[in-house]
Each structure stands twice: as structure tokens, then as C-alpha cells.
Amino acid sequence: MKRAFRFNTCELEAFGSGALYWPDEQLLVVSDLHLGKSERVARRSGQMLPPYETIDTLTRLEAALDASQAAQVICLGDSFDDLDAGAALAPELLDWITRLIAGRSWTWIEGNHDPGPLEIGGTHRAEMRVGPLTFRHIAQATAHAEVSGHYHPKASLNAKGRVVTRPCFLYDDARLVLPAFGTFTGGLRSTSETLTGLMAPSARAILTGESPVEIPMPKR
């Protein structure tokens, strides 16, 4: 499922998976894949997570590509959990990523966890402009028509007497912040000082899930 909305002058679609689609540009955007997270956590802390998060993330990414038939893809940074995590991916996972890239214009935006998977295909950029929109990893205070990631936003709503919390898209007149697409990535609540300070009072949240729901951005 998806939720259509307008940002700047662009008609966009928020997929329930956390991917963003721009039909007019045949462009799919995902942020914060954090591929290889379980390997990185085990390497640095010794804590063992179920080692299937990369498979799950790539499965959902492939489903979003199939659903959208996107000709262009932008990954908004932190595509790998760190450089060593990218190097440690099994050959069959690297082959899978190569197959997803094949036949598409694919751009890796640099994140704070990694500068981009340099040995894999695609173009590597610090940021990218498409039409009126600028795509980068971390939002800038003076941004206009900016699409970014980094913060892994999530929001809560009261649904039939119970509180539901999900990753979410946040947008106002100046910026759009995507949820983390990767499995096991966690999130920052929309009520945090960081996000309430970043987003305008009129900001909206689109909660991900089987049926995406749009609400005023929760701020407390």
C-alpha cells in the first residue's frame, strides 16, 4: 500500500515499506539500509543479532522495485552499517545487489556511517539534485525542497484505544525526512527535540505499515 502526497511541486508516494516513489521521474528513494548491521554489532560488541537483516532488507527493496518499476534509484546514505560491514557481505548478497542495480540509474549518497559502497556499481555522490528537489543524507537547517534521511523518524498515534508506533515520513514546506528502510535500524521519535526543532509547526507524519496513515506530526 502507499499514500500519495504533495511536496513542493512534486506528486510523491510514500510506500508502506518506507520507500519513497516519484512517478513523474520513475524514481525510487530509500534511506538508511544499514546492510550488514548484525555483522557490525557482533564484531564491535560481541552481541549476536539474528543474521538475516540484510536478506530481509534486500527482499523488501526488491519488492519495492518490482512494485514501482523504477528506472532510477537513490539510496540516501548509510547504505552499509560501516565500511567493514560492506566488505563482509557474502558473495551471494553482493550479487543480489548487483542484480538490483542492473538496468537502472542507481545513486549512492554518502552517509555518516559510510561513504558509499565503492566496489559496487552505481554513482557515488555527496548529494544530488533532481528537478526542484535536493537529495542528501542529513537535513540542513536552511534547506529548501530537500529530501533526506539519517534520523530514522518514527511516530505514534492512538488507534482504537491502543498506541501504535511506526517508522514514518516527516514533511513540511521545506523538507522531507524518510524513515530508515533497513531492518533492525531503530528510530528517533518525532517528539524528540532534534525533530521538533528541525520540522515546522505544520509538519505532517506518514506512518509506514500495511496501510500508511497520515497525521499531524506528533510533537509531545
Image (spheres, rainbow, N blue to C red):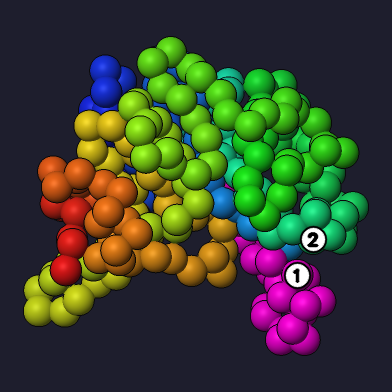
Q: Residue at x 27, y 23 (%)?
A: 8
Task: Confirm whether the magenta stretch covers residue 39.
Answer: yes
Can residue 65 be seen at all in this image of the molecule?
A: no
Q: Which mark is residue 40?
A: 1
Task: Read off the magenta span.
Answer: 37-64
Disc 1 from disc 2: Cα separation: 6 Å
The answer to whether 116 is drawn above or below residue 41 in the figure is above
200 is higher (above) or lower (below) than 72: below
Q: Main secondary structure of the magenta part?
A: helix
Q: Quadrant of the C terminus?
A: bottom left
Q: Which residue is at the front of the view, 102 or 158?
A: 158
Task: Specify whether 12 is left or right of 80.
Answer: left
Q: Is residue 127 left or right of residue 82?
A: left
**Residue 85, numbered label:** 2
Mark 2, Cα crowd under 10 Å, few <14 / some 14-19 / many 20+, is some
**Residue at the spot x=63%, y=32% of the render?**
126
